[in-house]
Amino acid sequence: MKLLCDHMLGSLAKWLRIFGHDTFYPDATMNDDRILRIAHDEKRLLLSRDKELLIRAKKTLVPVLEIQTTDLTAQLRQALKKIPLDEKLILTRCTLCNTPLRSIEKEGIKDKLPEKVFQTRNKFWVCPVCSKYYWMGTHYENMRKKINTLLQKE
Ligand SMILES: [Zn+2]
C-alpha cells in the first residue's frame, strides 16, 4: 500500500519508510490541493491529523487514515492496525527520500564508513538518490526494539 503523510506527520513518515512502505512526505511549500492531487493520482492512502484536509480528501475519494494523536508511538500503533508490518520490507527504503535501497559491497565504500563499522558489519545498503549508507548497527538494533514494543499486545 502506498502512503502519504501530511506535513504534521514527519516522524511517522520516517518510520513508515523504515517499515519499507512507499511513503510520500510533502515539502514545506506544498499546498493541500497538490497533496490531494498526488494522493489521488498515485493512489496513496492519506494519513493526516488535519480535519480540513481529511474532509476534502473524502470529497475527492482519496482514502484516509485519520491520525488521532500527537504521540509517535500511538500513531505507529494506529498505522500498524491498518497497514500490516511485513518483516521482509524492513530497512529496504531510504528514510530521507523514500527511494528503494540497493545492497552494496563493503570493500567499495571503506573510506565512507567509520572504521569500527567497517570491521564489525558485513551487509550494507546505499540510497541511489541521496547516497546515504545503511547497515545493521546499534541504530538498527534500537529500531528493532522499538518495533518489537509496538508489536506487543496492548
Ligand atoms: Zn535517499
Image: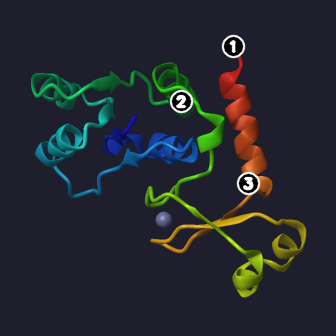
Q: Is residue 10 left or right of residue 59?
A: right
Instruction: Give me the disc on residue 139.
Output: 3
At which x and y percent is residue 100?
50, 57
Q: CA distance from mark 3 to mark 2?
A: 18 Å
In-front residue for pair 52/46? 46
Instruction: Give me the disc on residue 76.
Output: 2
Of helix, strand and loop, which one carries label 1?
loop
The quarter of the rendered structure image containing the N terminus is top left
Q: Is residue 132 above or below residue 150?
A: below
Q: Which residue is mark 1?
A: 153
**Pointer 3 or 2: first along the chain:** 2
The quarter of the rendered structure image containing the C terminus is top right
Q: Residue at x 53, y 33 (%)?
A: 72
Q: Residue at x 57, y 41 (%)?
A: 19
Q: Is residue 11 above or below residue 65?
A: below
**Pointer 3 or 1: first along the chain:** 3
Q: CA distance from mark 3 to mark 1?
A: 24 Å
**Pointer 1 or 2: first along the chain:** 2
Q: Amino acid at mark 3?
A: His
Of helix, strand and loop, which one carries label 2?
helix
Q: Quadrant of residue 116?
A: bottom right
